[in-house]
Amino acid sequence: MAKTPIFLVLMVCCLLAVFAERKRFTLYVNSHHRDLNETLYADDHECHTIPYFYRNRASSIKTHGHCVVLFPSLDCKEGEEFFFKAHCEGDGCCRHTDFADCEIEKDDGTVLKIDNAAQAYVIC
Ligand SMILES: *[C@@H]1O[C@H](CO)[C@@H](O)[C@H](O)[C@H]1NC(C)=O
């Protein structure tokens, strides 16, 4: 008879643990975290496609303390990582409030931008 409450408590604990694991960040269509925004989640370090409406449209991000990599390709192409994290140093480190001045120069001299170009993400 006393088994049901214990089972329920275990269920709730499991659910809490799962949600605590999920990392989130918020994309904004405009710079400086203004207006239209969408919060995305991931509980792994796999490549995820940004939802259609926000693809090629994001101009700023809130990482909520997480490390996020955005890619201007759907398949998270290597060498095209744009990093958004605290104390980021080196190539591919972008400002969270405005993507406009962030670019990567590839080995072949091509310059990639992430403003209005992000298509996929990885939680790092
Ligand atoms: C983010 O979008 C929600 C609606 O989905 C809105 O209420 C909120 O004001 C937006 N945030 C900002 C900073 O504009």
Image (cartoon, helix red, strand yellow):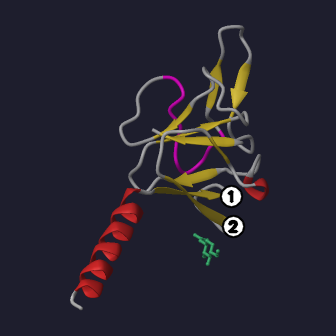
Residue 64 locus on image (x, y percent): 42, 57
Question: Which quadrant of the render holds ligand 1?
Answer: bottom right
Q: Label 1 neighbourhood size at 10 Å, few (<14), some (14-19), many (20+)? A: many
Residue farthest top in this picture: 108
Residue 97 locus on image (x, y percent): 55, 51
**First in sequence: mark 2 or mark 1?**
1
Residue farthest front in this picture: 1
Front one among 122 and 70: 122
Marks 2 and 1 in Cβ contact (< 8 Å): yes
Residue at the image point whose x is 32% and y is 81% from the top? 8
Give the residue pinned by disc 2: 36
CB of mark 2 near ligand 1 (< 8 Å): yes
Residue 3 locus on image (x, y percent): 25, 84
Front one among 110 and 40: 40
Magenta highlight on residue 99: yes
Front one among 75 and 39: 75
SS at mark 2 in the image: loop
Give the residue pinned by disc 1: 30
Q: Which mark is residue 72?
A: none
Task: Provide the residue span drawn in magenta.
Answer: 91-100
Magenta highlight on residue 93: yes
Residue 16 locus on image (x, y percent): 35, 69
Residue at the image point whose x is 24% and y is 81% from the top? 6
Residue farthest bottom in this picture: 1
SS at mark 1 in the image: loop
Q: Label 2 sits on what residue type? A: Leu
Q: Nearer the viewer, mark 2 or mark 1?
A: 2
Q: Label 1 sits on what residue type? A: Asn
Q: Main secondary structure of the magenta part?
A: loop
